[in-house]
Every structure is written in structure tokens, then in C-alpha cells.
Amino acid sequence: MSRQANRGTESKKMSSELFTLTYGALVTQLCKDYENDEDVNKQLDKILFSYFLPRGYNIGVRLIEDFLARSNVGRCHDFRETADVIAKVAFKMYLGITPSITNWSPAGDEFSLILENNPLVDFVELPDNHSSLIYSNLLCGVLRGALEMVQMAVEAKFVQDTLKGDGVTEIRMRFIRRIEDNLPAGEE
């Protein structure tokens, strides 16, 4: 029985490492395809997974369906509850980590996700000529895409990055507005 449990853990670790290495190969190719890091950062945020999926930041758009089906999480009532679900359920489910939630703004419309360990940067060292590359910018695109599908417009950006010598990786999230459903005329 313990052998089977151990195999499941090994399989998850192998899948995680395969994803990390595949992601690294894609970032490397984007660095070769684009002249500057800013263009690569835009691609990582917006269209990285267009290699595998249709256009856009679709990994987040598609991932939310899987997340809602697998997690049994209901609709969040406010941004604080959304932050808790992102950190304690989504990151744990897909990356095997639980970031801490800190630095709430007084208005409650901004917070930071602190990743002590970012699995996307395992095996990674940024070359000196790519000092402005935001290697894990995929995460910001995933967060924006997923939250847009549940009617939340947000901004997500990296504030700190362990690849750039910071002690932790910090993603700053800002609530912009609730997206209203626009139904075609005559339908309600």
C-alpha cells in the first residue's frame, strides 16, 4: 500500500519537473525569437500557451474550468475570499505550494502573494543579458485570465523575484472592477 502512495508522489514530482523543464525550453525559445526582454515578458503574460492552445492568456481561461470542477469552491463574495482561494487552493492544487497573502491595501483592493519557493524557477539561472526578463510572468497571465472568467478584472505583476536576487517572489494583485455579463438583446 505504501508503495502505491509513493508512486503517486513520484509521478507528481516527475510531472512537475517535466512541466518546469518544458516551460524553461519555451522561455528559451521566446528569448531567441524576440529581440528584447520586454517583448518576451509580454508573450509570457499573454500568449505563451498559444503553442498548445488557441490564442491569448488562455491557460488561465481554460484552467478556471478545471479548477471549479475539481475544487468544489463556490463563488467568492469579496476580494479577500478570492485571495484565500487563490493562495490556499489554486496554487496548492496546480503548483504544490501555498503562498502567503500579505500587504493588503487599506481599501482592500490590493494584496501580495509571497512565494517562498517558486517551482517554475527550479533549474533556472537568468543570463546577464536577460536581466529584465520576468521569467515567471506566465503566472500573472494565468491569474488575470482565470479571474476574468469569473467576472473579475485584475492587474497582476511581479514586484520581487528570487531569480533577480530577492529573498522571495512577490506577485502584486490589484482588483480593477467587477465585469458585468452582457447578454444579447432579448435574453435575460
Image (cartoon, rainbow, N blue to C red):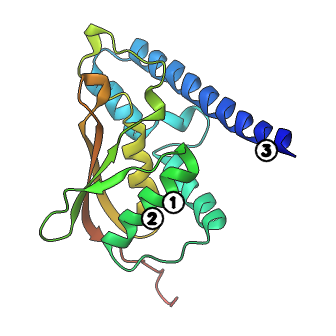
Label annotation for residue 123: none
Q: Badge 3: few (under 14), some or many (20 or more) residues near its Cα, within 10 Å?
A: few
All told, the count of numbered labels is 3
Q: Is residue 105 above or below residue 169?
A: below
Q: Are marks 3 and 1 in contact (CB under 8 Å)?
A: no
179 or 78, which is in the foreground?
A: 78
* Tag 3 secondary structure: helix
Label annotation for residue 85: 2
Q: Residue furthest top?
A: 128
* Tag 1 secondary structure: helix
Query: Please, what is the three-letter code of the amino acid marked with disc 1?
Result: Val
Query: Please, what is the three-letter code of the amino acid marked with disc 3?
Result: Ala
Instruction: Give the alpha-carbon distance from disc 3 to disc 2, as whole Å.
Output: 27 Å
Q: Which residue is mark 1?
A: 89
Query: Please, what is the three-letter code of the amino acid marked with disc 2?
Result: Val
Residue 175 position, x and y percent, is 26, 64
Q: Are marks 1 and 2 in contact (CB under 8 Å)?
A: yes
Instruction: Give the alpha-carbon distance from disc 1 to disc 2, as whole Å.
Output: 5 Å
Q: Residue at point 48% right, 33% down?
A: 119
Q: Badge 2: few (under 14), some or many (20 or more) residues near its Cα, within 10 Å?
A: some
- Sequence-first disc among 3 and 1: 3
Q: Residue at point 36% right, 45% down?
A: 140
29 or 85, which is in the foreground?
A: 85
* Tag 2 secondary structure: helix
Q: Is residue 107 above or below residue 185?
A: above
Q: Residue furthest front?
A: 2
Instruction: Give the alpha-carbon distance from disc 3 to disc 1, as whole Å.
Output: 21 Å
Residue 64 position, x and y percent, is 54, 59
Q: Residue at point 47% right, 31% down?
A: 120
Q: Which residue is mark 3?
A: 5
